[in-house]
Image (cartoon, rainbow, N blue to C red):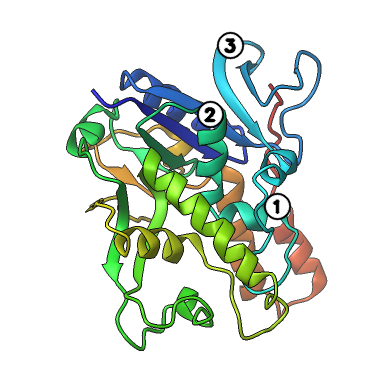
Amino acid sequence: MPKTLIFMRTHIITHGVITEFLKLQHSTDYDCVLLIDNHRKIISGGGLTDEPVQYLNFFDNKVKNIKCFLVDEKIFSALNLPYYADKNKNKSFASLMWYCADYVFYAVKKYFPDYDYYWQLEYDVFCNGSSYKPFFERYNQQVDLITTGLNKVEDNSKWCWVEKTDWIYDDIQLYSSFFPIVRLSASAIDFLYKRRIEMSEIFSGICKSKQNRWLHCELFVPTELLNNNFTSAKLNEPLRLTPNYDLNEERIFENPDYKIYHPVKGNYELSLSNLQSKIKRFEKHKLSVFGYYLGFYIEKKVKKY
């Protein structure tokens, strides 16, 4: 049986994120890791070691021994890959984590070698049921790439990630993907990492030009793999929704269908979105009115582990 690692990636720690990770962990015999973007030190304090991989407790030790991978600039710097997000030298770690989501696979494989397959699930993914087991049974296929949104990019496409990439993709079939849930084989990860290194050597000499764009992961990963004899399967999920309530916190299973939903935002993100909508509606009113509505937004305080 192929050896598989699942990692859930998050930049926030909330009850919903931890509960969803526990559900994931209890759903399968696969090894599971909570990958935490810790460049803002959301995990800090006594008891931590210098090792990026360690077992942590959360919520006043009510949840214990969660295997975590704490990722920061130091981890990514060791990959010797450029910090590009889009066209320019963007040094924002958060932008890099989003724009080059494939980088995370390279870091994970470095610290967790010897697996055949690696699943990545983002924090705002929700399984509408008590277990992920049906999902993993549906996609138990021995292929190199499983992702949603896997399609050929048509000529003259207006997809933004295609623009200004002819410095490397001039006469090649392009492919699109969507990255909330992705599975890659070990051999695919090794190949992609090698290609990123090769491309960075080319791009370093032209990166200052506004006519060139560093490749977004949702274009780079499927295009490279499907043009180099790797196998793939289309993930028919996640289904997108805009909930009126926060599934990721409240764990609502009124009609469990065991499908995967995205994006499921944290409460603070929904509150901020609502606030921004109110600001637009009342932007012509006096500052006092704006201040009144601003009072409805209270940023959620998250306890550190």
Q: Is residue 19 visible?
A: no
Q: Tag 3: residue type?
A: Lys
The quadrant in which residue 127 appears is top left
In the rendering, at what x and y percent does residue 20 appear? 43, 30
Residue 24, position in %: x, y?
Answer: 38, 26
Depth check, mark 1 against mark 3: the one in front is: 1
Which residue is tagged 3? 62
Identify the mark nearer the N-term, 2 or 1.
2
Residue highlighted by disc 1: 93
As helix, strand or loop, the secondary structure at mark 2 comes to strand
Asked whether, in this view, residue 52 is left or right of residue 180, the answer is right
Q: Amino acid at mark 2?
A: Leu
The answer for how far apart the CA atoms under marks 1 and 3 are is 31 Å
Residue 129 in the image: state x and y as whole percent.
28, 31
Q: Is residue 86 left or right of residue 151?
A: right
Q: Are marks 2 and 1 in contact (CB under 8 Å)?
A: no
Q: Which residue is mark 2?
A: 34
Does residue 63 appear anywhere in the picture?
yes
Label number found at residue 58? none
Q: Secondary structure at mark 1?
A: helix
Circle nearer the viewer, 2 or 3: 2
Q: In the picture shown, does residue 252 fall above or below 181?
A: above
206 and 218: which is toward the camera? 206
Local packing at callout 3 (Cα closer than 10 Å; few below 14, some 14-19, many 20+) is few
